[in-house]
Image: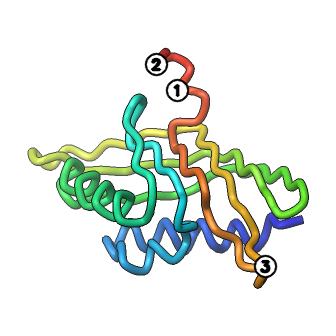
Amino acid sequence: MAYQPLKQMIEAADKAITEEDFDSLMAFYADDATLVIKPGLIATGKEQIHKAFLAIVEYFNHSLVVKQGAMQVIQGGNTALVIMETVLETVDAAGVASSMSRRATYVFREDPAGKWLCVIDNSYGTELLGAL
């Protein structure tokens, strides 16, 4: 089961987001990956995802801290579905701290060299259904 390698990888990706190290973050994504920026808005490919993260941290006043809670991994062959609690902590322009929790869904694919890469990054999880 891919649980431990994926958990460590997601923690490292969260650290890269928190530190705004988006060049390193792109190593976690497949070339054809898709990021749900918000319901109804996606970015596809590393170039678009990189630009999206620049806009996301700007939106959150460069205060975004990403953490993970409980996680379930369901693996079939070289594909894994990760269902987990994602916690976003921010501080607005007035200095007011806030925290939000989402039940995120991620899809990872293992490449021929054995490296797991994120192909779908959906921090909104099933909340997307409410946007229909």
Say which residue appears at 80% left-offset and 64% top-offset. Answer: 3
Q: Earlier in the sequence, mark 2 or mark 3?
A: 3
Badge 3: few (under 14), some or many (20 or more) residues near its Cα, within 10 Å? Answer: few
* Helix, strand or loop status at disc 1: helix
Residue occupied by mark 3: 112
Badge 1: few (under 14), some or many (20 or more) residues near its Cα, within 10 Å? Answer: some
Considering depth in this image, is 2 or 70 the residue closer to the camera?
2
Front label number (1 vs 3): 3
Front label number (2 vs 3): 3
**Contact, CB < 8 Å: mark 2 with mark 1?**
yes
The picture places residue 112, in percent across and down from the top left corner, at 78, 79
Q: Quadrant of residue 80?
A: bottom right
The picture places residue 114, in percent across and down from the top left corner, at 78, 80
Q: How many marks?
A: 3
* Helix, strand or loop status at disc 3: loop
The picture places residue 78, in percent across and down from the top left corner, at 83, 64
Residue occupied by mark 2: 131
Residue occupied by mark 1: 128
Is 58 situated above or below 38? below
Name the amino acid type tagged 1: Leu
Is 122 situated above or below 109? above
Q: Mark 2 and mark 3: span between their CA atoms?
A: 36 Å
Badge 2: few (under 14), some or many (20 or more) residues near its Cα, within 10 Å? Answer: few
92 relative to 7 in the view: left or right:
left
